[in-house]
Image (tube, rainbow, N blue to C red):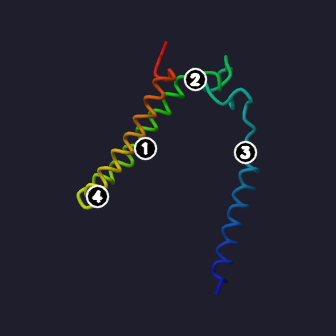
């Protein structure tokens, strides 16, 4: 019953191992300067994790919050007429929670750029 699955799994395993062996036999050792993580082979002038100010991470989190809001609102718009007032109340509660989060971020200074 499972003979086909076993044959397929072993064929895939042999194929993966064969491709890995072929890569190891034909790979050329790269120049150490060209394998740096950024800048296309230029010597880095600063650490990769210290390139951006922390305020950009806060802006990214706010963007993701509003992006997820749209992810919830599109299907809601499709079914709001079928569900009725309950769907409208639930969406306004969700938007109120999101608005409270934005007010908290504003109060904490996450939206200040200076």
Residue at the far left in the pictured view: 81
Q: Residues within 10 Å of mark 1 (few under 14, many from 20)?
A: few
Residue 92 placement: quadrant: top left
Which label's residue is closer to the chain start, 4 or 3? 3
CB under 8 Å between discs 2 and 1: no
Which label's residue is closer to the chain start, 3 or 2? 3
Q: Residues within 10 Å of mark 4 (few under 14, many from 20)?
A: few
Residue 37 in percent (x, y) is at 66, 31
Q: Is residue 94 left or right of residue 14?
A: left
Work out how far the residue at label 4 is from the one at label 3, CA to CA, in angstroms: 55 Å
Q: Secondary structure at mark 2?
A: helix
What residue would you read off at disc 2? Answer: 54
Q: Is residue 81 left or right of residue 97?
A: left
What residue would you read off at disc 1? Answer: 68
What residue would you read off at disc 3? Answer: 27
What residue would you read off at disc 4? Answer: 79
> Which residue is depicted at the point 69% across and 57% down?
19
CB under 8 Å between discs 3 and 2: no
Which label's residue is closer to the chain start, 4 or 1? 1
Residue 9 in percent (x, y) is at 67, 72
Look at the picture and state if 6 lies above or below 66: below
> Which residue is depicted at the point 71% across and 51% down?
23
CB under 8 Å between discs 4 and 3: no
Q: In the image, which is nearer the foreground, mark 3 or mark 1?
A: 1
> Which residue is depicted at the point 33% across and 54% down?
75
Work out how far the residue at label 2 is from the one at label 1, CA to CA, in angstroms: 22 Å
Look at the picture and state if 15 lies above or below 93: below
Q: Nearer the viewer, residue 62 or 40?
A: 62
Work out how far the residue at label 4 is from the one at label 2, CA to CA, in angstroms: 39 Å
Residue 65 in percent (x, y) is at 45, 38
Q: Secondary structure at mark 4?
A: helix
């Amino acid at each position: 019953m499972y003979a086909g699955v076993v044959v397929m799994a072993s064929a895939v395993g042999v194929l993966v191992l064969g491709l890995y062996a072929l890569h190891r036999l034909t790979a050329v050792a790269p120049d150490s300067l060209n394998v740096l993580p950024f800048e296309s082979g230029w010597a880095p002038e600063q650490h990769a994790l210290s390139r951006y100010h922390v305020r950009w991470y806060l802006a990214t989190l706010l963007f993701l919050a509003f992006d997820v809001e749209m992810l919830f609102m599109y299907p809601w718009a499709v079914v709001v007429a079928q569900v009725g007032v309950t769907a409208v109340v639930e969406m306004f509660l969700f938007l109120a929670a999101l608005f409270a989060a934005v007010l908290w971020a504003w109060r904490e200074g996450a939206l200040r750029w200076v």
